[in-house]
Amino acid sequence: MSTFVRFTSNAEVITIGRGLASRTLPKSGWTHAAHFAAALWLLDLNASHLMPELKRAYNEATGVANTDTSGYHETITQASLRAARAFRAERVHRPLFEVCNELLQSALGRSDWLLAHWSRERLFSAEARRTWVEPDLEPFPFEGPDHYS
């Protein structure tokens, strides 16, 4: 569905995750695919609760302000982690890079996948950036904690 460079090893996924954590990933490398790669990496480390903090710090390090209109987005982060967690749980014995490739080829690989559940207005509201907001179009199919930070 989405066009992306196919990962060929776990090392490539790990490099993205570590680049996020160390704030050394080039800003141009922080793509939709990289978001899910980092999420899957953190899930494999049982450290997904660090994603909000890591994303906020990365944004600041790359000159992106975390405000009500830019930067960190709580609802998108939580929704993506819930989806990645469910996706990974069905593929626990497969290599991380293969899971990441399969996820990115699924409907989740589309950058607009959340708009099936949230209206654009609700998803991109200041409230949704600050805290988890429930979908207003379709129920969200992935369970998860209500917040990670």
Image: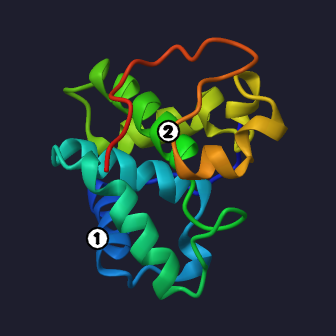
Residue 103 x, y percent position in the rendering: 50, 34
Residue 23 found in image quarter: bottom left
Q: Is residue 85 above or below residue 31?
A: above
Residue 101 x, y percent position in the rendering: 48, 41
Is residue 12 visible to us here?
Answer: no
- The disc labelled 2 sits on which kind of residue? Ser
Residue 51 found in image quarter: bottom left
- The disc labelled 1 sits on which kind of residue? Arg
Q: CA distance from mark 1 to mark 2?
A: 18 Å
Q: In the image shown, does 122 or 23 lie closer to the viewer?
A: 122
Question: Can you identify the residue that label 1 sits on?
Answer: 18
Residue drawn at x 55%, y 68% is 30
Residue 82 is left or right of residue 123, and the answer is left
Residue drawn at x 28%, y 22% is 89
Q: Is residue 73 above or below residue 12?
A: above
The crowd level at tag 2 (other Cα within 10 Å; few <14, some 14-19, many 20+) is many
Residue 114 x, y percent position in the rendering: 68, 32
